[in-house]
């Protein structure tokens, strides 16, 4: 029996009044939400940068090379860099920034070597290099990628049969600039005793990107848990099943895979987030659909039995006819 002095919102629906405790809780939640929003926006504005460090004596003459990362393809293990060459050495370039001799830039990495050639009279400019990187995409969103490259330059002569013969090495000075949106990059340069310049690169997803992915993953998990809990309440006859509830739980089986595609830089199916979270979210959603459907069939059957005329009533109707 319900207490008449206590309002029952099921029988007397009306707007609930917030107490002082309720207003305090609402204010605390608002402050937390504002603080989280401020931190995310602040990190998003400040991240996506590049850190640059050098080791060894920098070359004072030769070619100055500006290295700029412009894109990364984690699923293919590749990263694209834009290189810009300049020189103030009259033995390398003239006043118009054109090569006074045949010059060749060679980049060696984990996937082999690439060359950028500037024949005599050609203008120094920009070139794009697609180089290999190493990392585990399956660890998304905590995946990071590293690589080590060796840069060298030389004067070359075109020999018979199209063979290019190196004539003299050219010192190289490397400077990193720019960054990739959504990634934090670190570039370190080591000037070796030989003519090679070693460049180490490290890519890590920005904090805002990680947080974005974790929030979506958490929402998917929470929604599937809510659906499973409600379905268990319905299955145990603690709540009444409805057709709308069956449609809602069934729609999760289509919504969760779509939600996964919203992850920034979403990896192919089979990553760690699928094994640890998304697979079980879909399983819980399927169980929720099963429990709600079974409850709906059982409860509807019980309602039909209650409203079905008794055998004595049916016999009387037939006798009266």
Image (tube, rainbow, N blue to C red):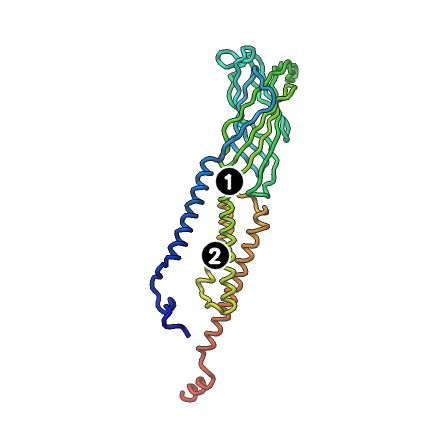
Q: Position of residue 84 (x, y in %)?
A: 52, 22
Which quadrant is the C terminus positioned in? bottom left
Numbered circle sitting on residue 19: none
Q: Position of residue 125 (x, y in %)?
A: 51, 20
Residue at 61 percent across and 32 percent down: it is 147
Could you say which quadrant of the image residue 118 lies in? top right
Instruction: Compare residues 168 and 193 and report the one nearer the observer.
Output: 193
Instruction: Compare residues 15 and 262 and report the one nearer the observer.
Output: 15
**Badge 2: residue crowd in 10 Å (few <14, some 14–19, many ≥20):** few
- Give the Cα separation between the discs numbered 2 and 1: 31 Å
Outermost residue toward the front in this view: 20
Residue at 56 percent across and 43 percent down: it is 140
Q: Which residue is mark 1?
A: 207
| Disc on the earlier residue, 2 or 1 | 1
Q: Is residue 140 left or right of residue 35?
A: right
Q: Position of residue 264 (x, y in %)?
A: 50, 42
């Amino acid at each position: 029996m319900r207490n008449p002095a206590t309002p029952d919102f099921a029988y007397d629906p009306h707007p609930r009044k917030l107490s002082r405790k309720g207003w305090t809780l609402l204010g605390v939640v608002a402050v937390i939400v504002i603080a989280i929003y401020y931190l995310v926006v602040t990190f998003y504005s400040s991240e996506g940068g590049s850190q640059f460090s050098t080791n060894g004596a920098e070359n004072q003459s030769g070619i100055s090379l500006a290295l700029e990362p412009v894109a990364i393809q984690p699923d293919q293990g590749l990263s694209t860099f834009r290189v810009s060459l300049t020189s103030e050495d009259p033995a390398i370039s003239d006043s118009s920034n054109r090569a006074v001799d045949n010059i060749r830039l060679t980049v060696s990495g984990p996937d082999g070597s690439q060359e950028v050639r500037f024949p005599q009279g050609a203008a120094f400019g920009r070139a794009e290099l697609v180089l290999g990187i190493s990392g585990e995409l399956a660890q998304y969103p905590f995946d990071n990628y590293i690589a080590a490259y060796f840069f060298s330059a030389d004067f070359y002569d075109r020999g018979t049969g199209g063979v290019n013969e190196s004539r003299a090495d050219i010192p190289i000075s490397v400077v990193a600039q720019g960054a990739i949106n959504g990634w934090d990059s670190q570039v370190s340069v080591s000037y070796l005793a030989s003519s090679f310049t070693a460049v180490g690169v490290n890519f890590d997803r920005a904090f805002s990107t990680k947080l974005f992915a974790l929030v979506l993953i958490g929402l998917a998990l929470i929604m599937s848990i809510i659906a499973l809990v409600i379905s268990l309440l319905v299955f145990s006859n603690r709540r009444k099943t409805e057709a709308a509830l069956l449609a809602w739980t069934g729609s999760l089986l289509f919504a969760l895979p779509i939600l996964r595609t919203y992850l920034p830089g979403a990896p192919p199916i089979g990553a760690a987030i699928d094994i640890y979270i998304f697979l079980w979210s879909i399983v819980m959603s399927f169980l929720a659909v099963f429990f709600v459907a079974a409850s709906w069939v059982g409860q509807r059957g019980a309602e039909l039995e209650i409203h079905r005329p008794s055998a004595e009533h049916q016999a009387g109707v037939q006798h009266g006819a």
